[in-house]
Amino acid sequence: MKKTMMLLLALALAIPVAGAGRADAQTYPDRPVRLIVPFPPGGATDVNARILAAELSATLKQPFVIDNRPGASGTIGIDMVAKSAPDGYTLGVSGVGPTAILPIIDPKLPYNPARDLDIVAGLGRIDFVLVARPGLPVANLTELIAYAKANPGKVTYATAGVAGPQQLQMEHLGLLAGIKFFLVPFPGDAPATAAVVSGDVDIALMGIATGIGLVKGGKLRALAMAGSERSPTLPDLATVAEQTGFTEFTGYTWNLLVAPKGTPAAVIARLNAAVAEAAGKPEVQAKLDALGIRPLPGSAGKVSDFVASETAKNRRVIEATGIRRE
């Protein structure tokens, strides 16, 4: 009898809790949401996040507040997301490095994306352009490869950090071409770009929005589009594949909206729908186009499949090139 009473009491206590959980999901959000960006202000990820935050704030009627937490190639900020309460009030904007490169090469990483994060929505894909300092005696990628072969050990490339998508993709390009480019890492996009403009470093992969003004202003020379297709902003610039036949090479980065593992499915669905609504607005599309950001649409499940595919591809490149996090 005592056991029966205790069971009935437990069930009675559980019913209001379940009802409250459903109500919270239906009314989400009812207070400000923290949006952690694991990179410094001003870069493509940060700008993408700020466009998103403004739209989500307007659509969901609560402030989405940007919190920049840079460091360790984006892993400090994403670790903060992973360790937050799974209630939808702390979200993160993650990229290729923290999601699909560093978890492969760093066994000491304090989080595991598959175990500790829920993917909410895809935000965008940013194609890279391969650029060179003006004084480098090459006009395109074919000439760069020939120059690197004739001058072994001399061609340097800049990246925003270590073991990010730029390093992975430059090492992949070197592997395909049978040459070795030498890494010069910097603590962000701005100093990496400045190093190539100043002539201290020879080449770099950078987002089209960053590179376009510098190329048109004569401060950098565009050698190739690194994505799978030409850019409307530089329509005469041939892709890596067009110039070399390396059809397996793609040079781009991407951003995702992520949440701590265990965030209610209804909250994730609400956020995913709000992101899709924002991406469909012509004025938002215009802002993203200006940054060279292509939409990365789909349900949370579809975007999770994309990330799994990208992770598998990166693993193959990492195994072939031997990239490690020093």
Image (spheres, rainbow, N blue to C red):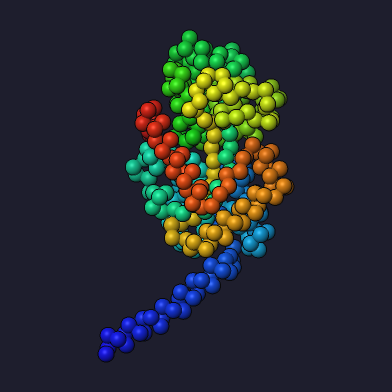
Q: Which residue sits furthest bottom?
A: 1
Q: Nearer the viewer, residue 87 or 10?
A: 10
Q: Position of residue 177 (x, y in %)?
A: 46, 18
Is residue 6 placed above or below 127 in the rendered structure? below
Quadrant position of residue 204:
top right
Is residue 279 placed above or below 7 in the rendered structure? above
Q: Is residue 110 left or right of residue 186?
A: left
Q: Position of residue 94 (x, y in %)?
A: 51, 46
Quadrant for the C terminus in the image = top left
Residue plotted at (43% across, 17% down): 178
Quadrant position of residue 153:
top left
**Count of number-bearing discs:** 0
Q: Is residue 316 left or right of residue 282?
A: left
Quadrant position of residue 64:
bottom right
Is residue 150 placed above or below 53 in the rendered structure? above
Residue plotted at (57% across, 30% down): 227
Q: Position of residue 42 (x, y in %)?
A: 62, 42
Q: Position of residue 234 (x, y in %)?
A: 67, 27
Q: Nearer the viewer, residue 307 or 169?
A: 307
Is residue 58 placed above or below 43 in the rendered structure? below
Quadrant for the N terminus in the image = bottom left
Confirm whether residue 81 shows in the render: no
Q: Which residue sits furthest right?
A: 283
Residue plotted at (49% across, 55% down): 259
Confirm whether residue 292 shows in the render: yes
Q: Nearer the viewer, residue 302 or 272?
A: 302
Residue plotted at (41% across, 31% down): 317
